[in-house]
């Protein structure tokens, strides 16, 4: 058995004491910190030496030794995905913030069991090469750490100067070719990644991620319907740039920033006609029993919105908007960590900025869904 240093023994003693206190008093995490979790080993026991180190890290980050904490033992089925919303300002004038986000994800993929990253679109402000250069450097942190991700273009990534007058996404496909996506299965159009689907397996379930362009055209939704219908035993996550609004509803008639307000959609005919959030729901999402989640960005106001809807087959669909581009430093580096716990049937949502090293704990930034079906459909 290896020797234990005095310092580590002190950590161990302190950690086990806090563990016993926490378990006996049902303590809660401080308001500015997320709950502390510990993994269970294969033999079902908590590794207390690891827990001691975890406590030390948590205390050093919180700066508050008196703070109470909640200890939640995490099962081996639990995993996370990260949502990266609207990084356009970082690519434009704050690339160091963007780099802090992706480096944190790379550094913490094991601790948080990050299985996938979803970029919700608007890599750039003006669809300019300088901005794409910054975006690709930041996303390379994920490539280098073998963190799989999916990306969809936003309106600012579409057309000359990002004005969305056409469907030209040449730069998006130049900087993010299909070969860059490790888990990509297929695309609507060869060598075009703006409409694609991806596989991953986590929590004992096979998943399919459907990635769709800004204001997806009717022909794209027809394709997406066929792909999801062909995968009845994969649980589906949909990511697209514009879907949810900031009033807890989907983007619909009369809403600001509706895709129909952009030139590319105003001039579209027949199968090229665009779809907003309500239309994506009606024409695609609600029809499939295995679609469970839809994630999007784009909308301003307070930049958040959450909605649970029931599909035609009785399945619950959890829909979420997250966007921080209007905050200082181009968004202050906030992103969402969505943790899935199949054994508890829960999905936990946290909002964090590695740039500020700050967790958001407001009710619309940190919350959970209960009784979520995460089993194989």
Image: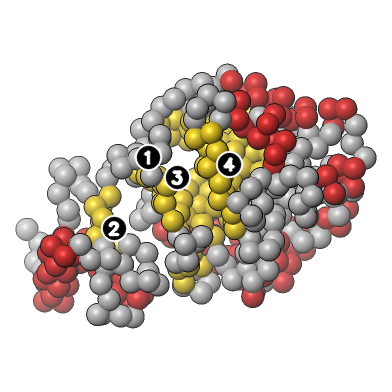
Reading the image, the residue beneath label 4 is 294
Q: Which callout, 2 or 4, points at the residue further toward the start of the chain?
A: 2
Q: Which of 173 and 265 is in front in this view?
A: 265
Q: Which callout, 4 or 3, points at the residue further toward the start of the chain?
A: 3
- Residue at image point 61% right, 42% down: 239
- For residue 234, side relative to residue 40 (left or right): right
Q: Nearer the viewer, residue 281 or 207?
A: 281
**Measured from the top left, where is residue 215 in percent x and y?**
76, 41
Q: Nearer the viewer, mark 4 or mark 1?
A: 1
Give the spatial CA distance, label 3 vs label 1: 22 Å
Classify the position of the N terminus by image quarter.
Answer: bottom left
Q: Which callout, 2 or 1, points at the residue further toward the start of the chain?
A: 2
Within 10 Å of disc 3 (Cα), the crowding (few <14, some 14-19, many 20+) is some
Give the spatial CA distance, label 2 vs label 3: 17 Å
SS class, disc 3 = strand
Reading the image, the residue beneath label 3 is 115
Q: Which of marks 4 and 3 is in front?
A: 4
Q: Nearer the viewer, mark 2 or mark 1?
A: 1
Q: Do the residues labelled 4 and 3 touch (CB within 8 Å)?
A: no
Reading the image, the residue beneath label 2 is 37
User: Residue at the right extreme?
Assistant: 267
């Amino acid at each position: 058995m290896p020797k234990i240093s005095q310092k580590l023994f002190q950590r161990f003693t302190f950690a086990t004491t806090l563990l016993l206190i926490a378990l006996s008093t049902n303590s809660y995490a401080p308001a500015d910190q997320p709950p502390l979790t510990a993994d269970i080993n294969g033999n079902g026991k908590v590794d207390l030496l690891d827990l001691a180190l975890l406590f030390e890290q948590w205390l050093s980050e919180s700066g508050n030794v008196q703070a109470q904490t909640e200890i939640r033992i995490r099962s081996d089925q639990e995993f996370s995905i990260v949502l990266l919303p609207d990084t356009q300002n970082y690519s434009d004038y704050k690339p160091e913030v963007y780099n802090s986000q992706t480096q944190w994800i790379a550094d913490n993929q094991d601790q948080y069991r990050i299985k996938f990253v979803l970029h919700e679109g608007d890599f750039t402000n003006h669809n300019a090469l300088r901005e794409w250069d910054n975006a690709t450097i930041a996303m390379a942190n994920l490539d280098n750490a073998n963190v799989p991700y999916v990306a969809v273009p936003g309106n600012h990534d579409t057309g000359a100067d990002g004005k969305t007058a056409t469907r030209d996404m040449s730069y998006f496909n130049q900087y993010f070719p299909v070969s860059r996506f490790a888990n990509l299965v297929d695309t609507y159009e060869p060598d075009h990644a703006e409409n694609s689907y991806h596989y991953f397996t986590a929590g004992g379930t096979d998943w399919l991620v459907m990635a769709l362009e800004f204001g997806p055209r009717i022909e794209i939704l027809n394709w997406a319907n066929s792909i999801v219908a062909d995968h009845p035993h994969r649980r589906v996550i949909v990511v697209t740039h514009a879907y949810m609004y900031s009033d807890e509803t989907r983007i619909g008639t009369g809403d600001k920033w509706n895709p129909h307000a952009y030139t590319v959609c105003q001039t579209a005919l027949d199968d090229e006609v665009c779809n907003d959030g309500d239309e994506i729901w009606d024409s695609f999402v609600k029809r499939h029993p295995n679609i469970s989640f839809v994630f999007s960005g784009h909308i301003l106001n307070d930049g958040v919105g959450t909605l649970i809807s029931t599909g035609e087959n009785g399945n619950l669909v959890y829909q979420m908007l997250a966007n921080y581009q209007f905050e200082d430093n181009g968004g202050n580096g906030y992103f969402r960590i969505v943790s899935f716990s199949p054994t508890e049937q829960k999905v936990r949502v946290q909002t964090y900025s590695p740039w500020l090293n700050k967790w958001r704990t407001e009710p619309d930034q940190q919350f959970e869904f209960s009784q979520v079906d995460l089993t194989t459909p």
